[in-house]
Amino acid sequence: MKECPACGRTYSDFNRFCTTDGTKLADAAKSAAVPEDGNERRTIPPPPEPLPMRLTIIDQGDEGRRSRVIQGLVLDLGMQGLRIQTGTVETGRLNIIRDHTIAFKNKLEMEIDLPSATVSLTGFAAWYKPIGDGLSWTVGVYIRSMPAADREIYERYLKELAGNKGSDKLPASSSA
């Protein structure tokens, strides 16, 4: 799978340039949107232990088509997104992105077990790449929406993490 670094559209491996803007395509697993380990600039440190989470993939074209519940771990959290680890990026013909030839993103419904409560959110996978032997995947998830009460709990937890780093400031909230 290849992806346009400029617009994010995905293409088959046979394409070399984006049909929208002519940008040279990059391997999706090595896209510029995928942070290289250790090179990203975090404002919030990762949780002391990975957090349990569950997600369901919802077909972007038919919201009645849903995957089974997929287990995983949250490795990093931020105001706009998360980095998760899971053993499944495709199940029952539903891929975490949607498919490798079009730019539509499947919706992800997620539950994250924070230390104080479980929060729910809706988002989509911005990127994914295999870990080591390819039995697990790292996935970057963009948070599209979150109930207000859950957003408050989530932001409180982010402040706790940032406080452990020595900072009491978080970026301005963009509640969805």
Image (cartoon, grey):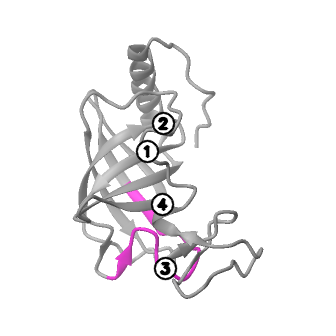
Q: Which mark is residue 82?
A: 1
Of callouts 2 and 4, the N-terminal one: 2
Q: Give the mark toward the camera: 1 or 3.
A: 3
Q: Which residue is mark 3?
A: 100
x, y percentage for residue 49? 24, 32
Q: Main secondary structure of the magenta part?
A: loop
Of callouts 1 and 3, the N-terminal one: 1
Quadrant into which the C terminus falls: top right
Q: Secondary structure at mark 2?
A: loop
Identified at 37% across, 31% down, the residue is: 46
Would residue 96 be counted in the magenta stretch?
yes
Looking at this view, is 72 or 149 the one in front?
Answer: 72
Identified at 32% across, 30% down, the residue is: 47
Looking at this view, is 111 or 39 the one in front?
Answer: 39
On the rendered structure, is 139 left or right of 102? left
x, y percentage for residue 26? 58, 69
Please state which amino acid type lies under the numbered disc 4: Trp
Identified at 30% across, 52% down, the residue is: 85
Assess disc 3: are there few (<14), some (14-19) or many (≥20) residues with their C-alpha within 10 Å of its C-alpha.
some
Q: Which mark is residue 78?
A: 2
